[in-house]
Amino acid sequence: MIWFFSMLRAALYTIFIQNLVFNGGYGSSEAIRMSAKPQRFLPFSMMIAFFSTVTALVCRTLDNFKEIKQSGSAVHAALYCAVLISIYLFVALILKLVLDPDKKFFSTLGIAALNTLVFAVPLINRNAGYSYTESIGVGVGSGIAFILALLLINVGLKRLEANNDIPPLFRGTPAMFLYVAMLSLAFNGFSGSSLFT
């Protein structure tokens, strides 16, 4: 039962305190783009959670090998990238053989799999020294954090579109970037870290 609470703690920390979209900027451009498509929130976030979790577990297992554990950051980044690409190709092949989805689905799958948010998870797990259960928690938490980010950005997008007081030069993309910057500052405040240290 301790493993469950360890996983839950890591997931909650990733969702609310260290939201990777707002605190690290990982996948933020995709979150802004996806926020305009509420019908795709859940499937896309589930794909991100799946790829984050599986990649984190495989990379955590590889880090148990002495040769890999002692290698430098560049080797780890290259290895994690190769793992992520391999998992994507394997999943895409299985889905192609079993379901035969359309090209749009594979495009969405690729964007979710090769997202900077997914790539950051095993690196964060390695730097934090997380266990297997904590790695699962961070992977699942990343997907949920992405959903939270999409929901918050979507609400802001609707409010910004309805606000006629915004000067014409700031409507659209500039206003959205300012809104996301404010959300990032708020989440940075949750984490308790200083922007100036």
Image (cartoon, rainbow, N blue to C red):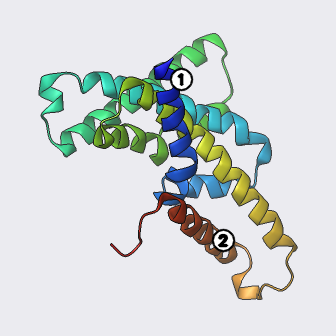
* Position of 135 relative to 13 (above/below): above
Q: CA distance from mark 2 to mark 1?
A: 35 Å
Q: Secondary structure at mark 2?
A: helix
Q: Position of residue 117 (x, y in %)?
A: 48, 46
- Residue type beneath disc 2: Tyr
| Residue found at x 45% / y 57% | 24
The residue nearer to you, when weighing 87 against 157, is 157
Residue pointed to by mark 2: 179
Front label number (2 vs 1): 2
Label 2: how many residues lie within 10 Å, few (<14), some (14-19) or many (20+)? some
Label 1: how many residues lie within 10 Å, few (<14), some (14-19) or many (20+)? some
Q: Secondary structure at mark 1?
A: helix
| Residue found at x 59% / y 52% | 30
- Residue type beneath disc 1: Ala
The residue nearer to you, when weighing 79 against 140, is 140
Q: Position of residue 9 (x, y in %)?
A: 51, 36
Mark 2 or mark 1: name the one nearer the start of the chain. Answer: 1
Q: Please indicate whether residue 15 sits to the left or right of residue 105 in the image.
A: left
Residue pointed to by mark 1: 92
| Residue found at x 46% / y 25% | 54
